Amino acid sequence: MKKELLLVIVLFFLISLTAITGVYAIGENTKVITISEEKADISGDGIDEVIRLKGVPYQEDDSFLKKIYIEVAGSNGKLYTFPLESGSKASIQLVDLNNDGMKEIFSTVQTGGSGGIVINSLSSLKNFIHTDLPLPEPLEMNTKFLDGYKAEIKLVQTGKTYKFNLRDRMNYYKKLGFYFKGKLNEPAELTVNPYSDLKPVQLDNGKIGLKGLQRVTGIANADTIALVETTWNYDRGHWKLIRTEVKKVKAR
């Protein structure tokens, strides 16, 4: 009985060891690619760090990455890793966005969907302390379709209202039964998308801010009605909206 029990224990140990070895083998064989590499002092000690953007692709397809991360080799001999969202066309920029005299890491990752949405992050390593800094939220809007093939967009932050003539897509709306004799079949709102672009820009005051772009769509994702452009400045710990521009998009 003792021999049988000992045999079971040995077999269980061998199976567990095989499973553990398999896990490590998968980890060791994982393909990691370096997307970009930068050198700059982002800690404030006067010595450059090495900042690498890395990713793990799906099998042999390098266009979409299931894992993306920033790896910083600090001048203090330590290695810092900042995970990002999965996606495609990942990139980083080293810019001073919070106006503290030290560059931060601004990252951009495209989600890869048809909506063209981007995911951004802002990280600081000042004094070798990793801090995730806030970014401006997408602009809030109240939207609705109107009778007579029209639409309305109101920006919550500014209170400004914009109206659009949609007769250039009238036949399309009529065909889908969205309008009947110029009247809406039922009340409907437009879709306000998150940022499709958010990038650092130089402001009039010489500082670096951010410029964002949002799409406002109608009855389908391809039915883009307007593009809303916003410009932001980081001031006293908060992002301040300093400019907005709303542009109508012609029907395809």
Image (tube, rainbow, N blue to C red):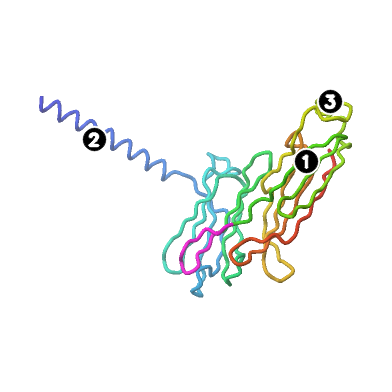
The part of the image, by quadrant, that contains residue 158 is bottom right
- Residue 166, horizontal then vertical, whole percent: 86, 38
Instruction: State the residue position of label 3.
Output: 175
Q: Relative to the observer, which residue lies in front, 113 or 48?
A: 113
Q: Is residue 31 left or right of residue 203?
A: left
- Residue 118, horizontal then vertical, whole percent: 64, 48
Q: Type of residue at label 2?
A: Phe
Instruction: State the residue position of label 1.
Output: 224
Q: Type of residue at label 3?
A: Lys
The part of the image, by quadrant, that contains residue 148 is top right
127 within the magenta span: yes
Instruction: State the residue position of label 2.
Output: 13
Q: Earlier in the sequence, mark 1 or mark 3?
A: 3
Tell which tag, 1 or 2, sits nearer the viewer.
1
Q: Is residue 26 left or right of residue 249?
A: left
Q: Name the residue furthest front.
A: 159
Q: Earlier in the sequence, mark 1 or mark 2?
A: 2
* Above or below, comparing residue 24 to residue 236 in the picture: above
Say which quadrant the C terminus sits in: top right
* Above or below, comparing residue 18 to residue 127 in the picture: above
The CA span between labels 3 and 2 is 68 Å
What residue is at 85 percent from the left and 30 percent from the top? 183
Crowdedness of circle 2 by 10 Å Cα count: few (<14), some, many (20+)?
few
